Every structure is written in C-alpha cells, then in structure tokens.
Image (cartoon, rainbow, N blue to C red):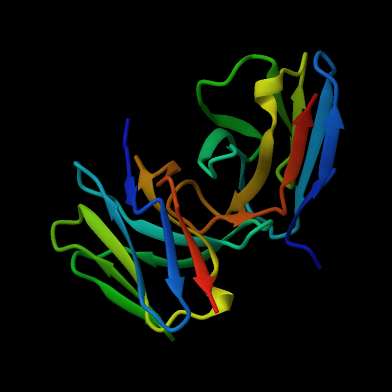
Amino acid sequence: DTAVSQTPKYLVTQMGNDKSIKCEQNLGHDTMYWYKQDSKKFLKIMFSYNNKELIINETVPNRFSPKSPDKAHLNLHINSLELGDSAVYFCASSSGTGQETQYFGPGTRLLVL
Amino acid sequence: GQQVMQIPQYQHVQEGEDFTTYCNSSTTLSNIQWYKQRPGGHPVFLIQLVKSGEVKKQKRLTFQFGEAKKNSSLHITATQTTDVGTYFCADSWLGNKLVFGAGTILRVKS
C-alpha cells in the first residue's frame, strides 16, 4: 500500500520533447507538492496544490505546468525539455499546508539528452 | 525569502563516531522539521521541533531547537552504516511551504 506513488520512476528523453510525470496519494491529504532535486541534492519546491487549487508557484519556467484533477492526484507536464531539466522530481503530500509532515513519493529520475 | 543554512555539506565518519549537522537562520524559525534521505531514496520525515529550547530523542538521534529559534541540530551518537544518507532540516515559512536546508551528506566507514 504505497502512500505516495509516482510514475514513471525513470525517464530518459531527448531535448525538445514533452513529457509528463504522474503522482497519486492515498493518504487522504489535502495538499500536494512538486519538488525538484538537483545533482547537489538541493530540494526546491516548485508547486503546491491544496484541494485542487494552486497555492504556491515558485519561479519555475512556464514550460512546467502542473495539473490536479482531484485532490489525490497531481501531475506535472513539461514542454520542450532542456538539458537543465535533468533532475529528480519528487511529489509529496501533507494533511495541511506548510507546517505538517510531508510524505514524499519515490521520485522520478529525469535525464534529458 | 527565508533561507536556512545547513552545515557541514559532507561528513565522513568512522563507524562508531558521533555526527552532528547544524541548521541556522538569520531570522526566527517557525518550526523545524528533519528529514533523512537514503542514497537513491526519497526524503523521510524524522521529527518536528516547535518550541524554543526543545530537545527530542529517537534512540541514538538527538534533535535540538535553539533558545532563540534561530538554529537547530541533529546529533547521532555512535554512527552505524545504516545511518548513511542525506539529512535535511526544513523550516515552515509563512506556514504554507517548507524551505529546506542544503542537506548534510553522511558517509560511514566500517
């Protein structure tokens, strides 16, 4: 019974392609997040949704577009992939916003060639 | 915006030695959460500190929150190979997002 799941686990693609990453949580949480972790392990929040509403949109290129069809799902679509997009992308969820424990998915390792 | 500084960046210890990672901020921290990420894994929540001067223990791990709420530390006594990974502190900024420190990578030599 995986609490936060992501697909795919690995993604290797060419520059310029468009790709999507999917995330689902079965914890009944109201808030979901996307984080980017670079090669130096730095974790940076990208987006946050609370009950399907976007509440945090950090300085992220508009090639990145999140979508939350319901509060258990948060997907990330990336257009025109660039080399610098190579990273690990983590989905996370929490019961509230900000102060509560966050539960992370296993990550999607994206490599752009 | 809020910045949380974490040191050291790396620490290599001999198995059985102690390890400490520190988080500091120039502004008052709201509350501090600590996470552990094993190599190839994802961050996993360890603990949350809320009160000034708070100290919490989990077996060989001791977590402290400074009296002024501007720093926090995680201390591991007698490290084991299972302790390897990256340890992150995170502050809840404005109550609506976590701001993570850069992490401390711990390697344990057996």
- Using the rendered image of the protein, determine whether residue A58 is visible from the camera's viewpoint: yes
Camera-side residue of A53 and A93: A93
Vertical arrangement, residue A108 with respect to residue A5, above or below: above
Residue at x 32%, y 44% (from the top left corner): B4
Percent from the top left, x then y, of residue B48? 40, 65
B78 left or right of B80? left
* Res A79 → quadrant: top right
A50 left or right of B62? right
Residue at x 67%, y 58% (from the top left corner): B41
Residue at x 80%, y 17% (from the top left corner): A15
Vertical arrangement, residue B51 with respect to residue B14, above or below: above
Percent from the top left, x then y, of residue B65? 25, 64
Vertical arrangement, residue B68 with respect to residue B98, above or below: below
In the picture, which quadrant includes the C terminus of chain B?
bottom right
Percent from the top left, x then y, of residue A100? 47, 56
Vertical arrangement, residue A54 with respect to residue B96, above or below: above
In the picture, which quadrant includes the N terminus of chain B?
top left
A9 left or right of A40? right
- Using the rendered image of the protein, determine whether residue A73 is visible from the camera's viewpoint: no
B109 left or right of A110? left
Total numbered badges shown on the rendered structure: 0
Q: Residue furthest left?
A: B68
Residue at x 35%, y 54% (from the top left corner): B8
Percent from the top left, x then y, of residue A70? 75, 40
